[in-house]
Image: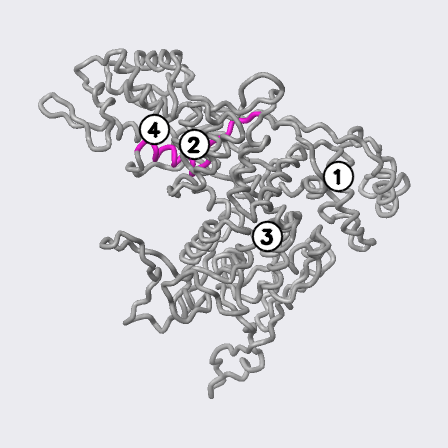
Amino acid sequence: MTRLACFPLLLVAGLFAFAQPPKPAAPAPVAPDTAFKDEIAPLLKAHCVKCHSADTAKGDVRLDDLNPDVSKDAARWAAVRDQLRDGLMPPPKETRIADAKVRAAVAWITSKTGDPAPKLPNQGNLIPHELLFGKPAPAGDAPAGRVWRLSPDAYMGFTQSITRGKLGGLVQPFTLVPERGIKDFAGLYTIDEPSTEILIRNAEAIVEAQTGHTTTGGKIAGRNDSVREFIAIMDPNAEPTRSQLESAVRLQYKMALNRTPTDDDLKRYLGLYDRCAKAGDRPGAVKTMLQAVLLKTDAVFRSELGKGEGSRRMLAPDELALALSLALGDKRESGLATAAAKGELATKEQIAVHVRGVLDSTRESDRTRVLGFFREFFEYANAANVFKDKPKTFVHSPGQYVADTDRLVKHVLAADKDVLRELLTTDKSFVNYTTAKNKQKNIDEPKQAVILNPNNNKNQTGPESVYGIDKWVPEQPVAMPANTRLGVLMQPSWLVAWSTNFDNDPVRRGRWVRERLLGGTVPDLPIGVVAQVPDDPHRGFRDRLTVTRDAACWKCHQEMDELGLPFEQFDHYGRFRATETVLDPDATAKNIDKKGKSLGPVTREIPLSVAGVIASSGDAKLDGEAKNPREFVTKMANSERVRQVFVRHAFRYYLGRNETLADAKTLQDADRAYVASGGSFKALVVALLTSDSFLYRSAK
């Protein structure tokens, strides 16, 4: 029976279903306090009521009659919060409200609205930092249960575990939202019709490989990649026994789902076989039955609903084993599944032991998502997606820059001490580095990754010259030239990732710093506004960027520009520079031949300003001027707030959602674990994966 003919039977049998994540319950509002009378009402009177009273009501908005009980006037209070948070009110011509007062007002309103976590990845910072870390937090309510579609990498890990990685040609059926920030969020994804078609085709391809065989003299024989137990029931001239069919289903369950089917499951799958076999194609019916297992809901979704009685339910052992596996890697980790079956994931202490075991494993494939976090946090891997003209004097190799930064991150993680500070301030880097297997010694030896043709290199220098290194050396990581670059934010990969095709991009770099290090927010570009820096090649970039000082632009650009400008220390290829090259109009005008024809542009070097200003960070110790990018990142690396914001991003990555007010204790405990361990990222991960936020779900 064909795939399309049998697919309706899969639906009828209920073997393939779309799971929709349940809606999260909103946390209860925080108890009332006296802040309205002492802080909020005076702020409204001083800065808002003049334009939004009964007499004026600009924009048809009144704020003089706001109810102090926020729950009774939630829509208007939410609008006030958003306008204050995004710097849209008061308007530019009015007196600016002190940053501390704005943060306090936004935090107070947020604490009263009881809003659930913002849904999109780039909205996580909308929960005020002060509400999460401002004071010791009690245990919060458990989050709602959820059903989480596999990530693209986890799905491919699922298929590779079944096929032992030997089957090519499978198509990735899933996508992630094109948003800033951590992208694999549980509440964002379902499975649509195009994805369903790809899933079916992939299941067909996998089962074809599993049941692949040859027939010689009326006898069938399996191939190298086929499954022996499946071949035994593929003979068209022999009716499979019920025992053989049940064994095949059990084996497919074991390989695909890492568990045993129930008696009801067996009954349904064998019933599917019977209905398909009526057409006379018994081998085809076997394939359909085996494909159905690969299309089962829990083959493409992960369930986190919890088990037990009461209002809080701990994840069931099989749910927990899968949740831990896919938090750390891209496949079902067999050790965690075994531990779950033995009852060894029953307590936080037991879970911590097994999580540490995976983190300490010599099999890097078990913890691919550890490096994945830093790739998503810094986004340096995007360097490979930024098109640039080929330079004439050196090799531009963004893929190798990314590989070098990957290796640097792994090097820092191997030491596992002061990880964030090291990643921001290390003066060492891997440079155009790879390894090659020495078969005689059975070891990996250092090797230059990109090697120029010695006979035809067009007078170019290799990628190491971008780092400022004159000669490649095998002993790496190597110290960078003094007073040039520190850490990931000055790696060529990060600088290129946050650049344009032809220039630097201090605005987006500054936005990255505001959101990823300071936990701030910047409103999206308004519709209809064209963000364009004047193309005046005779002016330096900092000078051209003054266009954003216009009042209508500056209310947002003040959150970004000064945080990105220190990285003007490097050109858009990531090379260190002390001056900036601009066009010399006078010299260009004079650069003509005897007939008055232009001989081309003439450039000159101008002084380069690489100072920046950290303002409105939420950390008074951090605010102030930084003379250069090295001083800038060092200040960031020493900031308690920056460390806590880093913890917030790790929470989002490992828990697959934005934090809520109910997660404050989890965040504070994770931060304490990180500090107490001397900045161990492993300790941070263990704290998150043994937290109530990860382990428990609400019974609602």
Q: Is residue 246 left or right of residue 322?
A: left
Q: Which labelled disc corresponds to residue 79?
A: 1
User: For numbered disc 4, what is the local secondary structure?
Assistant: helix
Is residue 241 shown left or right of residue 197?
A: left
Residue occupying image coordinates x 25% and y 15%: 244
Determine the residue located farthest toward the left in the rendered image. 217
Distance CA(mark 1)–CA(mark 4)? 49 Å
- Taking the spot 37% from the left edge, 41% from the top edge, the residue there is 363
Query: Where in the figure is residue 569, as x and y percent of width and height?
Result: 56, 67
The range drawn in magenta is 145-163
Question: What label does residue 512 carry, if any?
Answer: 3
| Residue denoted by label 2 | 194
**Label 3 Cα crowd, 10 Å radius (few <14 / some 14-19 / many 20+):** many
Mark 4 residue crowding within 10 angstroms, few (<14) / some (14–19) / many (20+): many
Q: Quick check: marks 2 and 4 in contact, CB under 8 Å?
A: no
SS for dot 1: helix
- In the rendered image of this protein, does residue 399 appear above or below residue 609? above
Residue type at mark 3 is Trp
Asked if residue 512 is positioned above or below residue 577 in the image, the reply reads above
